[in-house]
Amino acid sequence: MEETNREAVATAVQRVAGMLQRADQLDKVEQYRRREARKKASVEARLKAAIQSQLDGVRTGLLQLHNALCDVKDIQNSLADVSKDWRQSINTIENLKDVKDAVVQHSQLASAVENLKNIFSVPEIVQDTQDLIEQGELLQAHRKLMDLERSRDDLMYEQYRMDSRNTHDMELIRRYFGQVQSLSDELAKQLWMVLQRAMVTVRRDPTMLVSVVRIIEREKIIDNRMLDRQKQTTFIPPGRPKRWKERMFEELKETVSRRIEGTQSETRDSDKMWLVRQLELTRKYVLDDLIVVSNLMVQCFPPHYNTFTSFFHNYHDAVAANVRELAAGDLEANEIVSLLTWVLNTYSSVDMMGHPELKECDVTQLEPLLTQDVIDELLSKYIQTFTSNITGWLRKALETDKKDWLKESEPEADQDGYYQTTLPAIVFQMFEQNLQVAAQVDDTFKEKVLDQCLKQMCSFLNRYKEEAINYKEEHLKDRQLPQNYVQYMIAIINNCQTFKESINSLKNKYSKSPVASQYDEPIERTLNEVAREGCQFLLDEVFLDLEHHLYELLTRKWLTGSHAVDTICVTVEDYFCDFAKIKKPYNQEMTSEAHRRVVVEYMKAVMQKRINFRNPEERKEGADRMIKEADQFKMLFKKLSGTEEADRLCEAISAIAEVFKLSDTTMLSLEVSTLVSKYPDIREDHIVALLAVRGDASRDTKQKVIETFNQTRPSSSMVTQPIFKDITVPSMSMTSMTSMTVPKLLK
């Protein structure tokens, strides 16, 4: 207390010091004193009020405790009186046992009297009930059955109350009402039969279905009442609970399952389209049945049954079980696609579970018919089967096409007159059919099948290339066979362009991926190789026919008036009448290559030094002839190509002719420099060969020309279209042997 007083004094001193810090504040001392006095009075008043309130609460609490004590004493006295009265009444209760037994007996007799009519009429009621069941009057039959069961159950309950150990009397009652259980079972069979034909019944006689539902609802109420009484008395009548409501839902579910199983009437042995037919039947049955449920059956069941939702899920479960069974079977490739298309697309579409009349339930909220693992397994199986099948189909198609190559008739021509075979059409018809099927599943699967098609195409084209080479080699063994070798080789070349166009068409139609396939480049490369090699084979054929005439070039016979170049031009032009049926760009490439090879072969004839000019007259005559023949070649290939690009190659012949034509040997160095500037790929041995053909160059002249060549020779990187690169100059021994052997002019 003293500590509190000291703290209060210290606080007061501090406050007073705060108020009197300046001299002018002394004038307000009285004002401060009155203000503090008011605060003190206010605080004291609040304290008094709080203390008074606390005192009032204590006074009230004490009064209530006193009253509670008085009440406890009164209760104690009352309990003592009750205990005294209870002890006095024990003997009285024992004396009332006879009354209790009489009451129980009276209750049994009252129950017997109440059911007396049914008890004496049990056989008659049983027969009537049986007749009603057979007549289909199920509601009336059930009413009589309930009367019989109630009489039996009441008698058994009273007997159980009187003496639960008396099994003899209980068994007596059970035997007397023994036919009641048989009636109940017979009625249940009729109910289940109606439910099993619910889809038909609801259309023809919906009142029958309503009656069945009412009976089952009554039995559910009786079951609940009997179970409640069992909790109180432990007594339960025989055959209870029947649980007909649960059995009803099971029957409806089994009915749906049997309905779906009924679509499986066909097999692959009887019909190749068995699965498509089965899935279509399933779709039709499910849609028709659910529409019936939505429009008719829901009116026959209480709303709390959620009838439509229940049937919707039952059909989904039945279809899922059926689909899983199908997926686990040994399906063929087309059957796998049919199943997946139906599962992934048709099932949830407006043609089935997404139909507008079924919008009460959302099909997207259901579990998928097949798990993703099963779908992936089926897709993998399809890809394997497809790969195996397509490999076999491609092999057969190629074998058929090879047989066509040996025909005596020319290949067919397309609308533009280009030779072709049926191979590209057959191949891409196969691809198209499989891609159309794959597109029915989903885009991802379609991309996989397209990728597999391209992969198989890549392998197929390698075999196609090998067979084209074999075709050429077999022809070289006997050039008379096959009769239409040139025409079918043209068709092979044209097929390459058709393959390119078809592949691009497939990719544009079935692929949305902006990324190029890993097989695009190999396919493009192989097709170009097949086409270019085919063009090369055809040119080989041409030059085999020209071989003898090419050998006459730059010989004495040629100088004295040979018609070799005329024959060469006529032969080339004749062949190119057929080659005109080669598609672009290969026909243009082939014309350019033929032009190059003719010029190269002509240059080879020069470099092989088949002739040495003996005098200026021969050199002039030979040079003029070369210029004339260069013009012939130029005219020929302008005609074949329709362009002016043929000049440069033929001008090489003219340029060589100018070297031969030059009469002043001192100007040879200048002429050779001009030649080298135009054709940078010319080599020193070529210059030596040219000088040897001229036949008049001295050792010093040759030396000077070679030195000039070495000084003016440009970089080989400047060569844009080489002519001399592949022309070899034979040695002296080889030159001497040309009169005894026939040179191979083919590359």
Image (cartoon, rainbow, N blue to C red):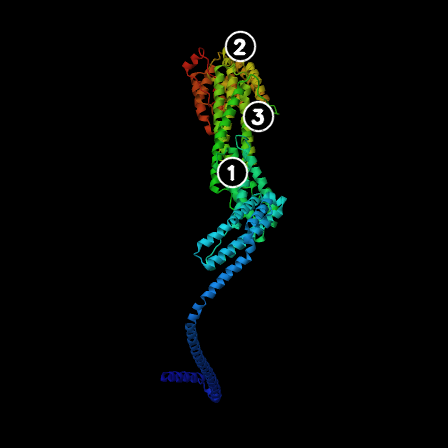
Q: Residue 646: x and y, percent?
A: 56, 23
Circle 3: element type: loop
Query: Is the residue 621 above or below the residue 166 in the image?
Result: above
Determine if residue 145 is in view.
Answer: yes
Question: Few, some or many C-alpha atoms within 10 Å of disc 2 (few <14, some 14-19, many ≥20)?
Answer: few
636 sits left or right of 72 in the view: right
In-front residue for pair 620/231: 231
Q: Please give the name of the residue rendered at 53% of the width and 10% of the height, measured from the top-left corner.
A: 560
Q: Which mark is residue 583?
A: 3
Residue underneath mark 1? 445
Between the residue at mark 1 and the residue at mark 3, the CA separation in whole angstroms equals 35 Å
In-front residue for pair 481/76: 76
Q: Amino acid at mark 3?
A: Lys
Determine if residue 529 is in view.
Answer: no
Q: Residue 442: x and y, percent?
A: 53, 39
In-front residue for pair 195/431: 195
Question: Few, some or many C-alpha atoms within 10 Å of disc 1 (few <14, some 14-19, many ≥20)?
Answer: some
Between the residue at mark 3 and the residue at mark 2, the CA separation in whole angstroms equals 41 Å
Query: Is the residue 711 above or below the residue 76 in the image?
Result: above
Instruction: List the single residue furthest toward the right.
Output: 204
Q: Quick one: label 3 or label 2, which is nearer the N terminus?
A: 2
Q: Amino acid at mark 1?
A: Phe
Q: Quick one: label 1 or label 3, which is nearer the N terminus?
A: 1
Tell me the quadrant of the picture where the N terminus can be found.
bottom left
Q: Amino acid at mark 2?
A: Thr
